[in-house]
């Protein structure tokens, strides 16, 4: 689904430079991209979806260069959830989610029953069916985030590229989201690549982790191999406690305070 070879990029001001990223993601795989602020996670995701063009190297997504592929065809196969921005024009939640069906609607035709069915299923999956008639820009941050994820799901894509999709979500809806993604991977071979800050969610829900530092791929592999104390200490420059959760069998990463907290 994704092949990046010696991928490099730099903004005009020199920020968020990526250095020779090599990455492959197979169909039905799920990959979490983690790392400290400013290490290039979002920049990498923007290169994968064609929002940015590489300075060096190459990237193919679903067999095509995302920067040169037909946008409608790419949107039928790839769903993207990026940082939130106002929609404007007083669109309702249902109308925003139906925007995800645009690649499937030919010409100036109205949405079909199939389009409405896909949109309503996505809203139900993200627990926003009761918000269908609400103005999008009047929602809470968490409700907006769930709406944006539902819009991407309504596309019925083969690949989802997500930039911190659990941002603003309470713990219930975080679990709902990631449980849903895992189910879609198993049932529909959906491929998921997601930028995450929560290392515990990365360890619990993702089969592979790409850990970045200063624009480079520091480590890539299964969570137990990547999210070691030594790697986390080297990349995030902070102390953590890493152990296996007896209930889930997955890694837990706990931050350790820098000072003596007994006085609090």
Image (cartoon, grey):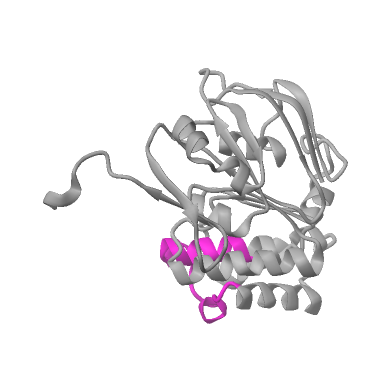
Q: Is residue 157 left or right of residue 198?
A: right
Residue 84 visible, this angle: no
Q: Is residue 203 visible?
A: yes
Looking at this view, is 236 or 46 the one in front? 236
Residue drawn at 82 percent across, 52 percent down: 27
Direction bottom: furthest residue: 130
The residue located at (54%, 65%) in the rendering is 146
The mark tally for this picture is 0
Vertical side of 172 occupied by 227: above or below: above
Give me the residue at 57% from left, 79% from top: 129
Region rendered in magenta: 126-150
Residue 112 on image: x %, y %: 80, 75
Task: Give the prevailing secondary structure in the magenta stretch.
Answer: helix
Residue 185 placement (x, y as % from top left): 74, 63
Q: Residue furthest right?
A: 63
Residue 60 on the magenta segment: no
The image shows residue 61 at horizontal and vertical percentages of 80, 42
């Amino acid at each position: 689904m994704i092949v990046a070879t010696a991928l490099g990029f730099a903004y005009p001001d020199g920020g968020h430079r990526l250095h020779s990223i090599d990455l492959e993601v197979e169909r039905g795989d799920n990959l979490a991209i983690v790392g400290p602020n400013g290490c290039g996670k979002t920049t990498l995701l923007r290169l994968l979806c064609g929002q940015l063009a590489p300075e060096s190297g190459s990237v193919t997504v679903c067999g095509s260069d995302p920067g040169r592929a037909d946008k409608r065809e790419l949107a039928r196969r790839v769903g993207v959830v990026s940082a939130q921005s106002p929609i404007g024009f007083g669109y309702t939640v249902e109308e925003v989610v139906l925007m995800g069906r645009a690649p499937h609607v030919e010409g100036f035709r109205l949405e079909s029953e199939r389009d409405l069915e896909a949109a309503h299923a996505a809203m139900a999956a993200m627990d926003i069916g009761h918000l269908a008639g609400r103005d999008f820009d009047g929602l809470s941050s968490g409700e907006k985030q769930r709406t944006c994820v539902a819009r991407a799901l309504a596309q019925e894509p083969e690949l989802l590229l997500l930039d911190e999709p659990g941002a603003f979500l309470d713990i219930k809806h975080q679990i709902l989201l990631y449980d849903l993604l895992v189910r879609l991977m198993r049932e529909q071979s959906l491929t998921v690549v997601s930028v995450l800050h929560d290392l515990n969610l990365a360890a619990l829900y993702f089969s592979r982790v790409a850990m970045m530092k200063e624009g480079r791929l520091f480590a890539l592999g299964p969570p137990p191999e990547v999210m070691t104390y030594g790697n986390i200490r080297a990349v995030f420059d902070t102390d953590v406690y890493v152990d296996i959760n007896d209930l889930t069998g997955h890694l837990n990463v706990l931050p350790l305070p820098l000072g003596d907290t007994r006085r609090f």
